[in-house]
Image (cartoon, rainbow, N blue to C red):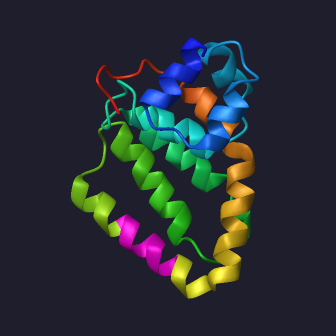
Amino acid sequence: MTALDNLLVRLDACEEAREWAKTQKNLVEAWQNCKRSDWMIWLIGRSTVDRNDPKLRLMACDFAEAVLHLVPAGETRPAEAIRVARLFAAGQASREDMAAARAAARAAAWDAAGAAARAAAWDAARDAQSDIIRKYYPEAPKIKRGTR
């Protein structure tokens, strides 16, 4: 069993991720080659990355911007929410500003789309997310000790 496989077993990774990881030499190579943003975000969640790291918020903004083209013409609430989130990450907006922008963007999403459209938006976003993640975290994150 490789060090990478041992790590993924310890972290209770899914079988599919563990099987794919067997094709990689180590965590560094796996991080660089991974196309599954959900796996990468899962790993960040088990890492030493601070949950308040502004890069996480900026990364989420990039995810959202990647699918703004799916927002109906004239609908500005999602773009405004992204703008406020970027300001918040820079320390230039309050939690109240964020809450209001988030509520407006959520309302816009529900107003504009049914379940099928939301699923299509997720699929479109996921295609670009692994590259966006590596923009903010070019190296594999350090894993917390004792994480299971």
Q: Quadrant of the C terminus?
A: top left
Q: Position of residue 132 (x, y in %)?
A: 64, 37
* Residue closer to the observer: 86 or 118: 118
Q: Position of residue 109 (x, y in %)?
A: 55, 77
Q: Position of residue 76 (x, y in %)?
A: 56, 71
- Residue that appears at 63% across and 33% down: 18
Looking at the rendering, the stretch of residues picked out in magenta corresponds to 101-108
Against 112, residue 47 (above or below) is: above
Q: Position of residue 2 (x, y in %)?
A: 60, 14
**Can you name the residue that lies furthest to the front here?**
1
Residue 59 belongs to magenta span: no
Q: Quadrant of residue 100?
A: bottom left
Q: Chief secondary structure of the magenta span?
A: helix
- Residue that appears at 64% across and 24% down: 31
* Residue closer to the observer: 121 or 87: 121
Residue 105 belongs to magenta span: yes
